[in-house]
Image (cartoon, rainbow, N blue to C red):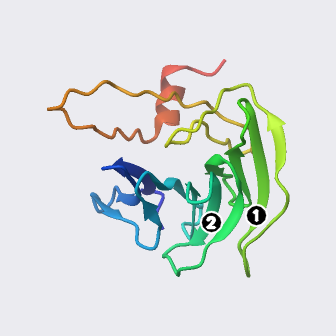
Amino acid sequence: MSSRTAAAGVFKDSVFSAWRFSLRERKAEPLSGIPTRVGGGMSQPSFSPDGRWLVYRSSETGSTIYVQPFPATGARDQVASGFSPVWSRDGKKLFFAGSRQFQLAVVNINTRPIVTTENPERFDAPLSVTMQTTAQFDVAPDDRIFAPVAAVTPQLKPSTSPRIHIVANWFEELKARVPAR
């Protein structure tokens, strides 16, 4: 799995589905083996740093976070209750939002030889996380909560199609624009 591949949840015609976007191949395709359901199903998918696992939130039985192998084998493991799951950079932890506003949690995860997790550790965060279809925060390499991502819902005219904007190498651009002290 290349770092030029991303997963995204798409909500269309009242159905959530998971898609894989390849920048190298310049194509998008639905991920097979991910459950979908009218009015619910899967959202917020994210590949592990090594590209071998996919984490996502499912509303099949409430708001549950699952992890499964990629490519899909039919197996999946429940990790926790919550939403907006985000992998740590080393793939050994999953951060996610809990049921309370301003509450985040982290769970240690081991994927070899089988998926095992520990009890989640909950903590208060200085940002508001709501049950959106996209992740609202990211995790820095040192496992600190990195930056809240603004949830913006543009008002689209019926003739306008939604667009996806991918910003690559934004940190390098930021360093060039804001010199170090």
The single residue placed furthest to the left in the displayed view is 159
Above or below 71: residue 129: above
Determine whether label 2 and label 1 are within 8 Å by CB: yes
Query: Callout 1: few (<14), some (14-19), or many (20+) C-alpha neighbours within 10 Å?
Result: some
Reading the image, the residue beneath label 1 is 109
* Left or right: where 68 falls relative to 10: right
Reading the image, the residue beneath label 2 is 67
Q: Residue at x 73, y 79 (%)?
A: 114
- In the rendering, at what x and y percent does residue 4 appear? 42, 56
Amino acid type at image mark 2: Val
Q: Residue at x 61, y 73 (%)?
A: 76
Amino acid type at image mark 1: Ile
Above or below 56: residue 11: above
Q: Residue at x 18, y 31 (%)?
A: 158
Secondary structure of the residue carrying numbered label 1: strand
Secondary structure of the residue carrying numbered label 2: strand
- In the rendering, at what x and y percent does residue 88 appear? 68, 52
> Quarter holding the C terminus?
top right
Above or below 10: residue 147: above
